Image (cartoon, rainbow, N blue to C red):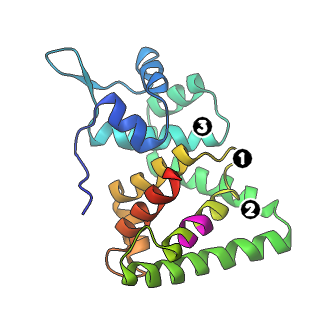
């Protein structure tokens, strides 16, 4: 079973989120994502910073520059729920730009991922051909939303699924332990 730590070092959070350590240090430098400091001066990130990083990455995916993201997140009266709704609307708008065939394929992929994930997880081997197929389908699904796919980002997103109870619940609805299995399958896929 994969354990999710409540505190992360720079390297651990960078790996989890699929960003570079340099990016996290830059975010600290500009005050966008400020970690706590240990007595030895090392940066440490808790759940509050992990949640904020998730929001930063949402805005970054929408093309919002770091300085504007900081202003948005630090604005008095910032409404996290409203921001998440805005992100959902932006994704929906992006989806509306899909052709009917692309939209149909996206819906097929969603259904197919969940069905094949349940079967692969029941078999239990995250390095099997069946598990690899699930990871490939998930990669294809991501390309509808990401313009620049990388295995590092894919793995970082998958690991964040375990850290967010909403994503974990979504994938575990396909079967108990499916979210963890998906992460392990993506880990194996990304090592290739």
The 10 Å Cα crowd at callout 2, few under 14, some 14 to 19, many 20 or more, is some
Q: Position of residue 111 (x, y in %)?
A: 59, 80
| Magenta stretch, main secondary structure class | helix
Dot 1, crowdedness within 10 Å: few (<14), some or many (≥20)? few
Q: Determine whether the residue tagged by mark 3 lies in a helix, strand or loop.
A: helix
Residue at point 64% right, 64% down?
A: 141
Which x, y percent locates residue 24?
Answer: 43, 26
Q: Earlier in the sequence, mark 2 or mark 1?
A: 2
Identify the residue shown where x is 37% and y is 71%.
169
Q: Is residue 93 above or below residue 107?
A: above
Task: Name the residue that disc number 3 marks.
Answer: 60
Which label is found at residue 69? none
Residue bearing mark 1? 147
Q: Is residue 101 above or below residue 22?
A: below
In the picture of the structure, the residue carrying the numbered disc 2 is: 95
The magenta stretch spans which residues? 133-137
Disc 1 vs disc 3: Cβ atoms closer than 8 Å?
no
Q: Which numbered mark, 2 or 1, is in the foreground of this view?
A: 1
Pointers 2 and 1 in contact (C-beta within 8 Å): no
Task: Tell me how far mark 2 sits from mark 1, CA to CA.
Answer: 13 Å
Front residue of this view, candidates 51 and 135: 135
- Could you tell me which residue is drawn at 28 percent across and 31 percent down? 9
Q: Is residue 136 magenta?
A: yes
């Amino acid at each position: 079973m994969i354990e999710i730590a409540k505190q992360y070092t720079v390297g651990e959070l960078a790996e989890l989120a699929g960003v570079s350590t340099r990016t996290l240090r830059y975010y600290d430098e500009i005050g966008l994502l400020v970690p706590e400091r240990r007595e030895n001066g090392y940066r440490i990130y808790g759940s509050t910073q992990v949640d904020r990083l998730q929001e930063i990455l949402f805005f970054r995916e929408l093309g919002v520059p770091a300085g504007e993201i900081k202003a948005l997140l630090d604005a008095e009266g910032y409404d996290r729920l409203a921001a998440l709704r805005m992100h959902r609307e932006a994704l929906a708008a992006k989806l509306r730009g899909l052709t009917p065939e692309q939209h149909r394929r996206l819906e097929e992929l969603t259904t197919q991922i969940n069905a094949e994930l349940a079967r692969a997880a029941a078999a239990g081997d995250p390095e099997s051909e069946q598990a690899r197929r699930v990871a490939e389908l998930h990669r294809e699904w991501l390309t509808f939303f990401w313009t620049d796919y990388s295995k590092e980002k894919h793995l970082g997103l998958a690991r964040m699924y375990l850290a967010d109870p909403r994503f974990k619940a979504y994938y575990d609805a396909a079967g108990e332990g499916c979210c963890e299995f998906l992460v392990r399958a993506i880990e194996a896929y990304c090592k290739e």
